[in-house]
Amino acid sequence: MSKPQQTTKLVKIRSANDPSKFGVGATTLNELIKKSGQLLKIPVSGARVCLYEDGTQLTEEYFLCLPFNTELVLLTKGQHWDGFLSDIRRLLDVDRYSAQLIDEAKKLLSNDQSAQRRKVLSDLLFNLKDRSDIEERAEDGDWFEGLNSRFKTKSAFMKYNCESRIRGYLKEMDAFIRTVNPARQQAECRKVLDMMAAKLREAAYNGCYFDRTAKDAHRLCSRQGWFTCQGAYDVEDCHLLHSINPYGNRESRILFSTWNLDHMIEKKRTILPTLAQALQERKSGDINADYFYRLLFTTDNLRLVHIVCHKKGAHQLACDRRKIYKAAKRTR
């Protein structure tokens, strides 16, 4: 009895490094690998085939079930394919394609009616303006537009940006203390404020958090300047994967100003009232002032949050005033 005749499967094949596609017909996966290897001049030892769309690796059985003209990629040993994202990554990594990519994205954007595609194309054009590798004002004047001429580098301004936010928290503490009564209690609060101000001056107001030239353990960004949203106060991380590089272009620098350094345990609702409470019957030297300092001015309690992830309502945390008050009473 004769074997059933095998059907030739027609597919489109390409390599990982070249977008050119070729039509190939084969009855088995092994035959496809051999023919494609010869056509694309790729060694077949250890080679494998995957779907162009998502990188799924083919088995013999899977190959036989493919629709005709399925787009495939032949990979050599050690190569990896992440679907069409690999093509996008390759284009973005090669500078000579940048101008062409920008032109094509603008053409598509002018005609595209899909809201989702318009968002993708707009984000692509926005990020292609990235000049985060440049640090000096003299080389990227557009980034510094509107900023004081005393800032000569991007890192210097970003450090100042963070310092300004921390100084703002100190001013809010000062404003709160002015409302404290009686006078003796306010005077003790003022002593704590003075101690914290001196400590902040010594730490350069923790401007290192936004300074990409600072030591790894001190900054909230990568060495290249990328910041990642740490998520709302009551979650472990940002499920929307917000990220931004304000060092990249002026638009990103301005947009970064909408990100919050959020107090997980709230400053006005919890920390400052508890500090005043702790000083009702105690002197400043009898409380754990350093504990309050860490809650108010350091990343022990500060979290960098995208505006979408910033929850403005009262923070419902297990760490309530009673627990903070108990910790505050411990002497230094």
Image (cartoon, helix red, strand yellow):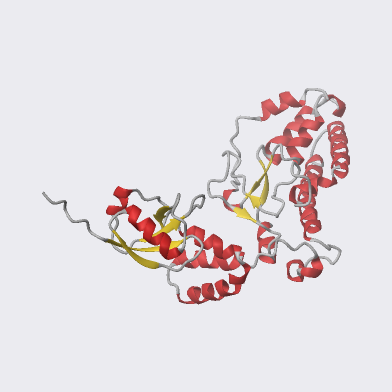
| Residue 50, x across and y down, in percent | 40, 54
Q: Is residue 272 visible?
A: no
Residue at the (58%, 38%) spot, across then down: 234
Residue at the (51%, 50%) spot, across then down: 78
Q: Is residue 157 visible?
A: yes
| Residue 158, x across and y down, in percent | 76, 56
Q: Specify the quadrant of the image occupied by residue 51.
A: bottom left
Q: Which of these two is toward me, 248 or 19?
A: 19
Q: Quick check: 80 above or below 193?
A: below
Count of numbered tags: 0
Quadrant containing the C terminus in the rendered view: top right
Q: Quick check: 322 above or below 269?
A: above
Q: Which of these two is toward me, 240 or 179?
A: 240
Residue 21 as seen in the image, left or right of residue 244: left
Q: Specify the quadrant of the image occupied by residue 126.
A: bottom right
| Residue 189, x across and y down, in percent | 83, 35
Residue at the (70%, 49%) spot, across then down: 221
Q: Which of these two is toward me, 286 or 3?
A: 3
| Residue 255, x across and y down, in percent | 65, 60
Q: Specify the quadrant of the image occupied by residue 325.
A: top right
Residue 161 as seen in the image, left or right of residue 270: right
